[in-house]
Image: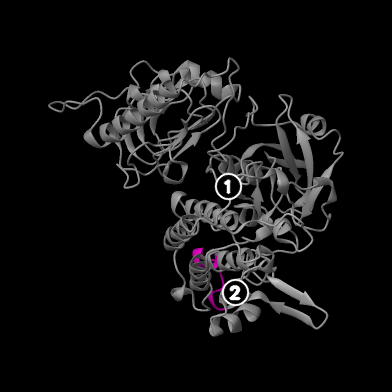
């Protein structure tokens, strides 16, 4: 059992369990479960089938034994199933083979040497039990985890019944790849043809952004879901097989604070990544002096917490860890509820441009956010992302961009803020557009957190767990002061997606 698994698994949202995501469309339901590398062994328990809303189930890199149960194919919402790296044996159920063949299920089975994955499996493929050894249905570690999840699911159902929440007749599949709030319908097949991409984007009619990897187009799936389609430029060095591998990898990286990858197109010259559309653009746009709708202090803190949660998952929830390498405010997007999600994770490593190099002379990243010790270390690390996050936090606090431009020249945000910090002048540090509508203690703590991220020496920087914990404390101080505004009031902060400059990083995908 994980340390964070206490109380209800889904509510309150800020204390939802690590390793799972929930949907809050009409009622809280568990929609993804990640038990990878959790030390599980024994058989796969039938109680998992009670989680009927689960879209993604990851049981990889454990010591599970026995055959793959047929009930996994009967789970109505399941779209991603990872059973790789176990000791499963026997024949794969035909129902699962069919779902894998028609691409309605992304199935990973590598690392199970005694598992037959074809239609022509020998009848004696299941290994006999060793004499004198009884095989229990599942050992205590698995039982504890699954019983806890089942109890959590029952608790959610009890809450639903108590509140008399009626589910609609239409079934909406909720993606696990990007959030605990809101829903996102997945295409039955996560692979798209170039013809389908052209139809989705109305023949590439509306450009909503452009970055180093190519142009980004607004699109709409056949079921009405809005998406952003990133077309990989011809200059990408990534080959067909590498693109396929990396795209499928990104599709199983899922967290409520990471932008969801819905699908991809891999037709050689027409390679594309299809993401959920983030209707409220990026954080840099909302911090711009030209934006008349000013983010409240509590909104800024919540955005910082959302981004920190996404980064914590990349660093600690993925095996191996994913280093973003280009974390910045334009790469933190906002959905219709102003929930922040990190985008472009994994792309810096997965898709290399002609002007880039696999050696460390041309690092991925953006001036102003780059780790100052990169040239000493010769490679990016998790602490490089921490430095970038500190710059993002200072942007949220001050409203200034990472590089402040003026008629006198350009100045890095740390050069501007350091003298004010040394004088203890917090009032002058915080964005003046907030008109002093913030708790001074909360602001002081936020500045301290940002400073803990940006020391020149890597070893002196805080880790993401500490940063996240202190940011939550910071928001608690603000809320308890009575000054905070209600979260999720996003309607006044929407922006015109057609007005994005083409040379800027994609604002929505």
Which range of residues does the magenta coloring cover? Answer: 376-384
The residue under the point 29% across, 41% down is 1
Q: In this orientation, which residue lies closer to the viewer: 297 or 6?
A: 297
Relative to 223, residue 416 above or below: below
Label disc, if present, on residue 487 of the rendered structure: 1
Please state, as top left, top right, bottom left or bottom right, where the C terminus lies in the image: top right
Whether residue 383 appears in magenta in the rendering, the answer is yes
Relative to 281, residue 474 above or below: below
Q: Is residue 509 visible?
A: no
**To which quarter of the image does residue 123 belong?**
top left
Secondary structure under badge 1? loop
Q: In this orientation, which residue lies closer to the viewer: 185 or 34?
A: 185
Q: Which residue is mark 2?
A: 427
* Residue 333 horizontal/vertical position (percent): 66, 50
The residue under the point 31% across, 47% down is 3
**Mark 1 and mark 2: Cα distance apart in space:** 23 Å
Secondary structure under badge 2? helix
Chain-order first, disc 1 or disc 2: 2
- The residue lying furthest to the left in this view is 132
* Residue 329 horizontal/vertical position (percent): 66, 59
The residue under the point 64% across, 52% down is 347
Whether residue 304 appears in magenta in the rendering, the answer is no
Q: In this orientation, which residue lies closer to the viewer: 481 or 357?
A: 481
* Residue 217 horizontal/vertical position (percent): 79, 42
Label disc, if present, on residue 297 of the rendered structure: none
Q: Is residue 248 visible?
A: yes
């Amino acid at each position: 059992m994980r340390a964070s698994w206490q109380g209800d698994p889904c509510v309150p949202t800020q204390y939802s369990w690590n390793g799972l995501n929930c949907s809050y469309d009409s009622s809280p339901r568990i929609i993804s479960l990640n038990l990878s590398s959790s030390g599980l062994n024994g058989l796969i328990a039938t109680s998992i089938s009670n989680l009927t809303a689960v879209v993604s189930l990851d049981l990889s890199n454990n010591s599970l034994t026995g055959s793959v149960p047929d009930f996994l194919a009967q789970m109505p919402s399941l779209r991603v199933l990872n059973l790789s790296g176990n000791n499963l044996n026997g024949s794969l159920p035909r129902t699962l083979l069919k779902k894998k063949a028609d691409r309605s299920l992304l199935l990973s089975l590598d690392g199970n040497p005694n598992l037959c994955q074809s239609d022509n499996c020998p009848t004696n493929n299941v290994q006999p039990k060793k004499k004198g050894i009884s095989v229990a249905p599942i050992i205590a570690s698995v039982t504890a985890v699954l019983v806890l999840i089942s109890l959590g699911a029952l608790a959610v159902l009890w809450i639903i019944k108590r509140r008399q929440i009626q589910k609609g007749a239409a079934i909406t599949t909720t993606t696990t790849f990007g959030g605990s709030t809101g829903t996102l319908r997945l295409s039955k097949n996560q692979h798209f043809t170039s013809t389908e991409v052209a139809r989705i984007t109305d023949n590439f009619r509306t450009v909503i952004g452009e970055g180093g990897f190519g142009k980004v187009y607004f699109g709409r799936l056949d079921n009405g879901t809005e998406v952003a389609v990133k077309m990989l430029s011809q200059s990408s060095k990534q080959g067909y097989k590498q693109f396929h591998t990396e795209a499928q990898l990104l599709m199983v990286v899922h967290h409520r604070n990471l932008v969801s990858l819905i699908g991809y197109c891999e037709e050689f010259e027409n390679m594309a990544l299809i993401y959920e559309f983030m209707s409220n653009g990026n954080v840099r746009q909302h911090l711009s002096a030209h934006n008349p709708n000013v983010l409240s202090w509590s909104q800024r803190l919540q955005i910082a917490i959302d981004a920190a949660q996404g980064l914590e998952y990349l660093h600690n929830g993925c095996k191996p860890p994913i280093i973003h390498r280009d974390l910045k405010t334009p790469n933190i997007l906002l959905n219709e509820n102003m929930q922040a999600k990190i985008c472009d994770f994994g792309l810096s490593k997965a898709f290399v441009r002609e002007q880039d190099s696999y050696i460390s002379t041309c690092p991925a990243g953006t001036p102003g956010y780059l780790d100052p010790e990169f040239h000493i270390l010769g490679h990016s690390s998790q602490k490089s992302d921490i430095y970038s996050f500190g710059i993002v936090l200072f942007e949220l606090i001050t409203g200034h961009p990472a590089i402040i431009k003026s008629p006198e020249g350009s100045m890095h945000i740390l050069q501007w803020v350091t003298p004010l910090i040394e004088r203890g002048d917090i009032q002058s540090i915080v964005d003046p557009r907030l008109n002093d509508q913030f708790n001074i203690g909360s602001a002081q703590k936020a500045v301290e957190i940002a400073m803990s991220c940006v020391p020149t020496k890597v070893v002196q920087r805080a880790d993401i767990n500490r940063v996240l914990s202190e940011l939550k404390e910071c928001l608690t101080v603000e809320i308890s002061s009575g000054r905070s505004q209600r979260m999720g009031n996003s309607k006044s902060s929407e922006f015109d997606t057609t007005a994005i400059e083409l040379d800027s990083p994609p604002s929505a995908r």
